[in-house]
Image: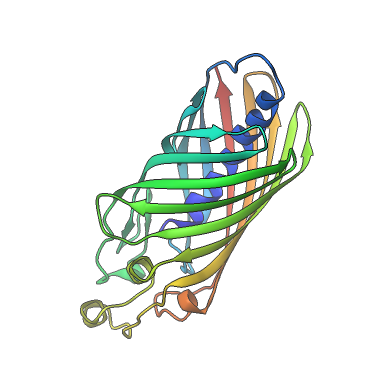
Amino acid sequence: MMITRKIVLYMVCFTLTGTATVVQADESDPAQPTFSLGLAGQSLPRYSGSDQRHWQVVPLIQGRDGAFFVDSQKGLGYDLQSENGFYLEHTLGYSLGRADRNSDWRDGSNKLKGMGNIKATINTAFALGWTIAPWLTVEGKATLPLSDSQGVNYQASATLIPLQSDTDTVALSAAALFGDNRYMNTFYGVSARQSRGTGYAQYHAAGGFYGTDTSLTWNHQFTPHWSALVSADYVWLDKHAENSPIVFRRNNTSATLGVLYTF
């Protein structure tokens, strides 16, 4: 499962693009199209609940033209913003799923051998948020799979920006995580067939609240073109996920270091 991986990078991208949105909202001139490319290195768990870690390098792609954007982690999308700070965002993205063996490019572990792979899927996400102040945003988001029935996951989050200058932005985000029954059992449940193949006890994960995610991100602008970001993330799993026999650690941390070039 890609909970930690997706949220860490989502928060990173929010910090970079969200700051620009605030600035643009204060300017009378139309925003110019922007495009950024970069790389990020991550140290993270092999999957949500894993007690093993690995390193990976991922591309960062961010482009925006008015309300439309492309993002390597969120996908293709658009957002609509009102003058009072409310916004609606719709994206079309892709989830890599989870492997039942160690993987260098997606979630997976040898400890899941016999569980079977979780298929990659195209998904769509809807987010409704409110920028209460330039330094505080609250948001609710739902992500629905389109090409494979893996269930729906939701999150309610708040992002605080205690520092924002011409060269530096610091963002602290906290999110409550929710999933329906299908989603929870796709990523945390153990069916009778999976139990026979792995030796793990059967487990039915109830839908609802299953954890929290807290992220701290620092973005530094070296020049008008070059910037770097550092992010630390902490995920805590509630009993609905923690009681699963494939969850070996309910507390997980991730770290991200990235460099971006804006054309």
Coloured how? rainbow
| Residue at (66% x, 38% y) in the render | 85
Q: Is residue 243 above or below residue 180?
A: below
Q: Quadrant of residue 136?
A: top right
Residue 163 in sight here: yes
> Which quadrant, please, contains the C terminus?
top right
| Residue at (58% x, 64% y) in the render | 212
| Residue at (47% x, 29% y) in the render | 69
Residue toward you, 238 or 200: 238
Percent across and percent down for residue 60 are 49, 34
Horizontal side of 26 relative to 65 (left or right) equals right
Percent across and percent down for residue 152 are 38, 60
Horizontal side of 80 relative to 192 (left or right) equals right
| Residue at (72% x, 24% y) in the render | 26
Percent across and percent down for residue 86 are 61, 40
Percent across and percent down for residue 147 are 25, 50
Q: Is residue 60 above or below residue 171?
A: above
Residue 45 in sight here: no
Q: Is residue 152 above or below residue 216?
A: below
- Could you tell me how many numbered marks the image carries? 0
The residue furthest bottom is 201
Residue toward you, 197 or 224: 224
> Which quadrant, please, contains the N terminus?
bottom left
